[in-house]
Image: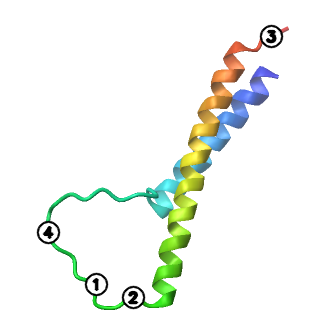
Amino acid sequence: MNACLNTAGLGASLVGVILLFRYGMPYHIDTGGGHMIVTESTPEILKAAALYRKIGFVGLGLIIAGTLLQIVANYIPSN
């Protein structure tokens, strides 16, 4: 049981990291480096941005879930 939980946690964390690298963090931090002017926002751009944000949250959630699964695997008594 411990090995299964640990493996599931590692798998979830791996998928979460891959999603975050592919789709980016779900929040953006203002670096104060300059000004950005958006000249046009099409519905397609807004839909893509919303999708990337949602997938970013899924990736972050998978990393958290994977970490929790690994912690739980350490506290379950093994036979």
* Residue at 55%, 55% in the rendered image: 57
**Mark 4 vs mark 1, CA separation in Å:** 13 Å
29 left or right, relative to 23? left
Q: Which residue bears the numbered disc 1?
A: 38
64 left or right, relative to 11? left
**Mark 3 vs mark 2, CA separation in Å:** 56 Å
Instruction: Name the residue type under label 4.
Output: Gly
The mark nearer the N terminus, 3 or 2, is: 2
State yes or no: discs 3 and 4 in contact (Cβ < 8 Å).
no
Where does the image place residue 1, in percent across and percent down from the top left? Answer: 82, 22
**Mark 1 vs mark 2, CA separation in Å:** 7 Å
Q: Residues within 10 Å of mark 4 (few under 14, many from 20)?
A: few
Q: 42 or 78, which is in the foreground?
A: 42
* Residue at 46%, 83% in the rendered image: 45
Closer to the eye: label 3 or 4: 4
Instruction: Name the residue type under label 1.
Output: Val
Q: Tag 1's secondary structure?
A: loop
Q: Which residue bears the numbered disc 3?
A: 78
State yes or no: discs 1 and 3 in contact (Cβ < 8 Å).
no
The mark nearer the N terminus, 3 or 4, is: 4
Q: Residues within 10 Å of mark 1 (few under 14, many from 20)?
A: few
Instruction: Indicate whether 16 appears above or below 75.
Output: below
**Mark 1 vs mark 3, CA separation in Å:** 57 Å
Instruction: Name the residue type under label 2.
Output: Ser
The mark nearer the N terminus, 1 or 3, is: 1
Q: Which residue bears the numbered disc 2?
A: 41
* Dot label at residue 46: none
Q: Residues within 10 Å of mark 2 (few under 14, many from 20)?
A: few
Q: Which residue bears the numbered disc 4?
A: 34
Instruction: Name the residue type under label 3.
Output: Ser
Q: Residue furthest right?
A: 79
Where does the image place residue 51, in percent across and percent down from the top left? Answer: 56, 71
